[in-house]
Image (cartoon, rainbow, N blue to C red):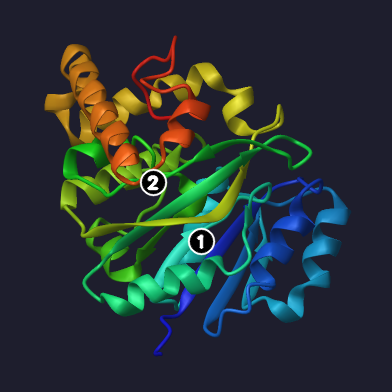
Amino acid sequence: MDWPKITVVTPTFNRIEYLEECIQSVAGQEYPNLEYIICDGGSTNPEVLRLIGKYGPRLAWWDSRKDRGHAEAVRRGFDRATGDVLAYLCSDDTYLPGALRAIGEVFAADPKIDVVYGNVYNTDAAGRIVRETRSVPPSPLGLITRVNMAQPATFWTRRGYERVGANFGGANWEYAVFEPQMDLFLRFARARLPCRNLRRFVATLRQHPGTVSARHRAEIARVPQECLRRQFPFWAHPLRYKLLWAAMRVRQVCWHVRQGELGYLVRRGRLPRRGASPGWR
């Protein structure tokens, strides 16, 4: 098989707790055509730089410099990347064994595909699985609501990335700190990039009090509407978006039933979760 070259970028800044686990999960993939890049935001913790240096021989490139936020670090890595397929993995998340081979097989089997996303395990600070996020086949409207598209399990082609601007974090760094993937995924949807879901667990998404999402909930809550106003102003209307979100939730549930995942629906408490508001989770 002609394996596509996959570039993975890990952004980090003064975070040592889970960094080595993250690095090992990528470097240990045994994928035959992997390029791994780490971009540090100018950490003042010498242990972070020591740890990155320890794995230097297994990295294609790494650097440490002050930046605007993790989006700039990711873009810096993408600008340096030479891969056919791009992805980024935050320093507290991990790839599961065999993940990149599974992703590479999908891209190799259908060169027209630009975006592939799989399943993730949501874990707590100790790495214990607390929830699953399973994927269903994509639809243009489903991508707008990003119903079950998890960032650590999402990969895209360089071709598709360049088509939507090759400017992760926004043309003017509008999303340098908060949820840059929302902006990127909406641009994928607007460009109608061909997508494919992979019914396999490929990554873990760690949830703990130290994440940006946990520490800046108020700021992050404003991002979805801002992204929608820029890319899909029609769906930015609150009532329209709620109706779309509800319709996509019903579609999602129907697909899970079709895929024989009733147990998953029960565990997730769908139809939908009580108290859940239309959003991006």
Residue 177 to residue 100: above or below: above
* Disc 2 secondary structure class: loop
* Residue at 36% over, 20% down: 271
At label 2, which amino acid type do we have? Ser
Percent x, y of residue 145: 28, 33
Q: Residue furthest left?
A: 234
Q: Residues within 10 Å of mark 1 (few under 14, many from 20)?
A: many
Q: Which residue in the protein does label 1 denote?
A: 76
> Residue 135 bears which disc, if any?
2
Quadrant assignment for the C terminus: top left
Camera-nearest residue between 129 and 205: 129
Residue 154 to residue 268: above or below: below
- In the shown orientation, is residue 15 left or right of residue 151? right
* Residue at 78% over, 58% down: 20
Percent x, y of residue 33: 52, 83
**Numbered marks: total:** 2
Does residue 173 appear anywhere in the picture? no
